[in-house]
């Protein structure tokens, strides 16, 4: 980074859990110095203010992160400008000088500084979005982590009762619900369920908003006539304890997801671009906020649709070597953003005429389901990007008319 960019000093930073190594070069000198500081609030505060008192003005820092504890700590200081560097790029740069691939924290800090100074046009400073948008981004991503936890617990619950109490799984169509978990905690064995009075069982289902007499009668009758899979106390006692532990964890996850849903539902509609995504086919209360967070509010960040396609990992990569050429999906991309576009595109197959026609067209060509959905997501990003840049809500009928004028096979005949 040239000195005329207005930086009084340049720093390469290699982060770690306990301490951070840095390589510093003044803006008016080629001399470099190395140092470390602990990953503690007081140590970071002392280091940042010490650097500023020494050099003043704005200071550029190159590091491998775009988010994380050290990034959040350094963003407090308006005199520090952070330049994220892709970790893979830094690793490849290190290998160019160290074929042994030996890693050394001070050396990595120096290499990060080299990259920032030698190729300034390759890196853009980290520009945080608004507090509301960043909050939404954290909420939807952390909610997905909880959903993944819930899925793991449900999968384990699908196996544990099978060892001694498989009927409990048959009585409920879905096992990630409050009614299932409450039932299991109250009657964790078939013997206990069979000892329950019919009136008690019926009252339980009514308390959990099961109003249909038929839906209540079927499991109640099944409980009365069910035969135990095993009478072995060793099997029943141990698997009952494990199943109860899993159900209790599931209940915690369900309550946590519900709290996140409430926070997202309250925050997302307050953001100016929310109506653009809320009205999309198949978006709903879960995917609309995720799409909004994926696009963000900095329109200069994705000036063209292909930039967002590459960033999200939806755009495939073509590799060529000699006479060989092959195409594969991008491996280095934000997984959650890629999941968002793919999962939403799958929801539009039955809710958008052209999306359904395009998907069936891809399947007819022999593409597997996942490949066809990603191809559909590739199409959708261009449309959404245009709506986002122009702040114009998506209009299905208008888009279908445009397809008809172009003679597209995905348009209504």
Image: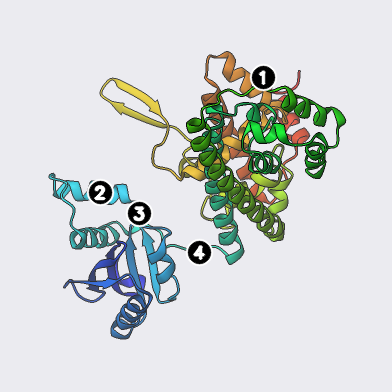
| Residue 163 placement (x, y as % from top left) | 52, 27
Residue 393 vs residue 1: left or right? right
Q: Residue at x 30, y 21 (%)?
A: 324
**Residue at image mark 4:** 128
| Residue 162 placement (x, y as % from top left) | 55, 27
N-term mark: 1 or 4: 4
Please tell me how crowded label 1 is: few (under 14), some (14-19), or many (20+) other residues with Cα within 10 Å. Answer: few
Tag 1, which secondary structure? loop
Image quadrant for the C terminus?
A: top right
Tag 3, which secondary structure? helix
**Residue at image mark 2:** 91
Tell me the mark number nearer the camera, choosing from 1 and 4.
4
User: Of residues 312 and 299, which is closer to you in this image?
Assistant: 312
N-term mark: 4 or 2: 2
**Residue at image mark 1:** 409
Please tell me how crowded label 3 is: few (under 14), some (14-19), or many (20+) other residues with Cα within 10 Å. Answer: few
* Mark 3 touches mark 1? (CB < 8 Å): no
The image quadrant of residue 326 is top left
User: Of residues 185 and 75, which is closer to you in this image?
Assistant: 185
N-term mark: 1 or 2: 2
Tag 4, which secondary structure? loop
Mark 1 → mark 2, Cα distance in angstroms: 46 Å
N-term mark: 4 or 3: 3
Mark 3 → mark 2, Cα distance in angstroms: 16 Å
**Number of numbered labels in the structure image:** 4
Tell me the mark number nearer the camera, choosing from 4 and 3.
4
Location of residue 324 with respect to 124 vertically, above or below: above
Q: Residue at x 23, y 76 (%)?
A: 28
Residue 391 vs residue 338: left or right? right
Q: How is the image coloured?
A: rainbow
**Residue at image mark 3:** 122
């Amino acid at each position: 980074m040239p000195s005329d960019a207005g930086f009084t000093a340049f720093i390469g930073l290699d982060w770690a859990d306990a301490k951070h190594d840095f390589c510093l070069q003044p803006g008016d000198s080629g001399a470099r110095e190395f140092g470390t500081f602990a990953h503690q609030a007081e140590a970071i505060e002392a280091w940042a203010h010490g650097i500023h008192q020494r050099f003043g003005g704005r200071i550029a820092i190159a590091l491998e992160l775009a988010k994380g504890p050290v990034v959040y700590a350094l963003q407090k200081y308006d005199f520090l400008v952070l330049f994220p560097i892709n970790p893979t790029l830094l690793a490849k740069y290190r290998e160019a000088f160290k074929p042994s691939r030996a890693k050394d924290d001070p050396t990595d800090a120096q290499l990060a500084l080299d990259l920032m100074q030698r190729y300034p046009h390759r890196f853009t400073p980290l520009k945080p979005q608004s507090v509301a948008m960043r909050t939404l981004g954290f909420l939807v991503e952390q909610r997905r982590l909880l959903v993944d936890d819930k899925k793991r617990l449900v999968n384990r619950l699908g196996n544990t009762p099978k060892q001694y109490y498989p009927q409990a799984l048959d009585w409920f169509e879905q096992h990630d619900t409050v009614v299932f978990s409450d039932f299991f905690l109250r009657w964790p064995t078939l013997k206990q369920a069979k000892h329950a009075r019919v009136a008690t069982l019926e009252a339980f289902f009514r308390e959990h908003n099961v109003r249909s007499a038929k839906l209540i009668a079927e499991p109640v009758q099944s409980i009365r006539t069910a035969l135990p899979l095993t009478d072995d106390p060793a099997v029943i006692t141990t698997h009952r304890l494990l199943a109860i532990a899993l159900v209790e964890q599931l209940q915690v996850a369900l309550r946590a997801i519900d709290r996140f849903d409430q926070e997202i539902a309250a925050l997302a509609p307050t953001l100016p671009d929310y109506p653009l995504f809320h009205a999309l086919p198949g978006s709903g209360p879960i995917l609309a906020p995720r799409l909004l967070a994926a696009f963000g509010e900095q329109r200069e960040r994705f000036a063209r649709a292909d930039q967002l396609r590459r960033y999200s990992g939806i755009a495939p990569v073509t590799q060529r070597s000699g006479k060989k050429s092959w195409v594969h999906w991008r491996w280095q991309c934000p997984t959650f953003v890629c999941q968002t576009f793919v999962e939403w595109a799958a929801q539009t197959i039955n809710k958008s005429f052209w999306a359904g026609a395009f998907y069936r067209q891809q399947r007819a060509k022999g593409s597997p389901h996942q490949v066809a959905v990603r191809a559909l997501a590739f199409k959708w990003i261009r449309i959404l990007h245009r709506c986002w840049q122009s702040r114009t809500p998506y209009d299905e009928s208008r888009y279908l008319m445009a397809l008809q004028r172009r003679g597209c096979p995905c348009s209504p005949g």
